[in-house]
Image: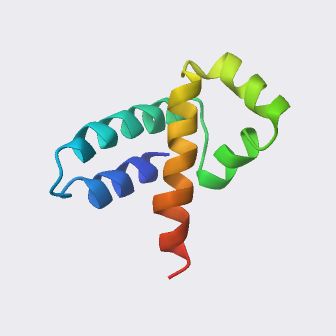
Amino acid sequence: MRQAEIYTTRLLGDYPRPKYGEYMAKLNKVFKQLDRLRVKNYLEFMHRVETKEKFEEFYKGAGLSVQEIVRAIKYLFFWVFPQRNT
């Protein structure tokens, strides 16, 4: 997930609104933890949280809050996945 951290920093790091700096830092914290958990990429992350049961199981061992996990999922759907289709 190191690549996700790099991509996020490149995407949001130069954004002119200060609130995106805080948002980027929060996302990168999640991606660092996902890297520690040996989550290899976006697809694997989404697979680990794709159902309510899988989400709950992932949450219990992730060392992340529900809010942090949901923030990362929302980021992927609004910022990452649309970019990959262009």
Q: Indicate the colouring scheme.
A: rainbow
Residue ranking furthest to the bottom:
86
Q: In which quarter of the image is residue 61?
A: top right
Residue 51 in the image: state x and y as whole percent: 82, 40
Residue sitting nearer the eye, 77 or 57 = 77
Measuring 57% from the left and 37% from the top, which residue is drawn there? Answer: 70
Q: Which residue: 36% across, 34% down?
A: 26
Q: Which residue is drawn at 26% across and 46% down?
A: 20
Horizontal and vertical percent position of residue 21: 23, 43
Is 79 on the left or on the right of 15, as rendered?
right
User: Does residue 68 appear left or right of residue 19 in this picture?
Assistant: right
Reply above or below: 47 against 34.
below
Image check: 40 left or right of 46?
left
The spot of residue 58 in percent (x, y) is: 71, 27
Residue 33 lies, in percent from the top left, at 49, 29
Q: How many marks?
A: 0
Q: Quadrant of residue 73?
A: top right
Q: Residue at x 53, y 28 (%)?
A: 67
- Would you say residue 36 is visible in this rendering? no
Q: Is residue 71 visible?
A: yes
